[in-house]
Amino acid sequence: MHSFMNTPGSAITQSLRGMALCHPDIIQVHFDPDFVERVAPTQAGKVAIVSGSGSGHEPLPIGYVGFGMLDAACPGPIFTSPSPIQLLAAVHSVDQGGGVLFVVKNYSGGVLNAELTIEMALQEGIDVRSVLVNDDVSIPIVANRRGLGAAALACKIAGAAAESGYSLDAVVDVTRRAIAASRSMGVGTNVNTLPRNGRGVNLADDTIELGVGIHGEPGEVRSVHQGVPEIVGMLIQPILDDLPYAADDRVLLLVSGMGGTPPLELYLFSEAIHELLSAHQIRVERQLVGNYLTSLGRGGYTTTLMKLDNELRDLWDAPVHTPALHW
């Protein structure tokens, strides 16, 4: 058996029901249209933060609904954007009069549906804006870069700013600044669980895919001869070169498994990443290691670095209570 989804068409609904049963103090789930909403009350005038994504990337976005992060999130079909009907229903439910911010990963369907929703909301007199997450340095043209781990980080920064009473303009500004300070890249070790056209690539034991996307987009097949440090160098150096990062920079490090790589291996990679950053005199001031942006159980992981200043650090440290993050 390769999956427990014996009835794939109902898997998302059943999973949402299970999630609601596990976190009744944090979230409530609406169906037809589907969206997840925070239980914690919000004050009138608070900016609402909303995100949407195809299912298969959990905990993004539905696991980040709750105090200090998202007010609502919309799950689409597997690897497919939620519809404008879902997004607009979420807006109606969480709008408190302070405006609404969409956190949108740079994929064509998600961008288009967010734009359509914003147009409809504006016609109703609701001030809705969006920020675009495009942190994947494996794509040379910046405008075409996909959203990766910075999507989770942006949701936290935006949610903390809104919870702190920032205006909509200020929330937009600080979230865009967080995204601009972030760079990511992914590495894959197998494609066995992904719904690709055809059978995909069968990787040899000494090869990886460098620069993979979270929807099964292939990367460049590379041979590896020196183990984890070599892979980390392939992954981190392009990130460091792109912003660029410099000695004495403070960073937030995210190492997110795609679902099929165990924590033991993620921590092996984390050790090597720390060593490489230390050699560049870059200080890891905050970090997350685990499954925070997944791809239906694929082997591999994504790494994100966000350059920190005092405001971004304080917003990251602000209290949060969601199914996936809690401090």
Image (tube, grey):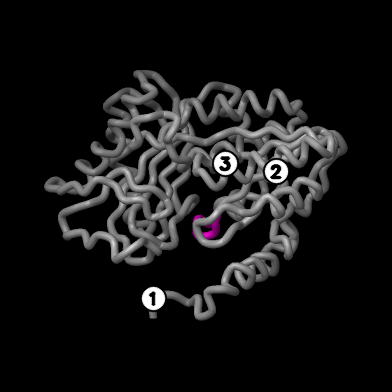
Q: Is residue 149 magenta?
A: no
State the CA–CA distance, disc 2 to disc 3.
10 Å
The residue lying furthest to the right in this view is 44
Query: Image point 45% across, 30% down: which residue?
Result: 143
Q: Is residue 162 visible?
A: yes
Looking at the rendered structure, which numbered label has been put on residue 78? none
Identity, as a three-letter code, of the amino acid under mark 2: Thr
Crowding at dot 2, Cα within 10 Å, few <14 / some 14-19 / many 20+, comes out as: many
Query: Tag 3's secondary structure?
Result: helix
Query: Tag 2's secondary structure?
Result: helix
Identity, as a three-letter code, of the amino acid under mark 1: His
Magenta stretch, residue numbers: 54-59
Residue hosting label 3: 111
Residue hosting label 2: 117
Quadrant where the N terminus sits is bottom left
Query: Image point 29% across, 66% down: which residue?
Result: 199
Crowding at dot 1, Cα within 10 Å, few <14 / some 14-19 / many 20+, comes out as: few
Numbered disc in front, either 1 or 2: 2
State the CA–CA distance, disc 1 to disc 2.
37 Å
Looking at the rendered structure, which numbered label has been put on residue 2? 1
Choose the circle earlier in sequence order: 3 or 1: 1
Q: Number of labelled discs?
A: 3
Identity, as a three-letter code, of the amino acid under mark 3: Val
1 and 2 marks in contact (CB < 8 Å): no
Instruction: Name the one closer to the observer, 224 or 121.
Output: 121
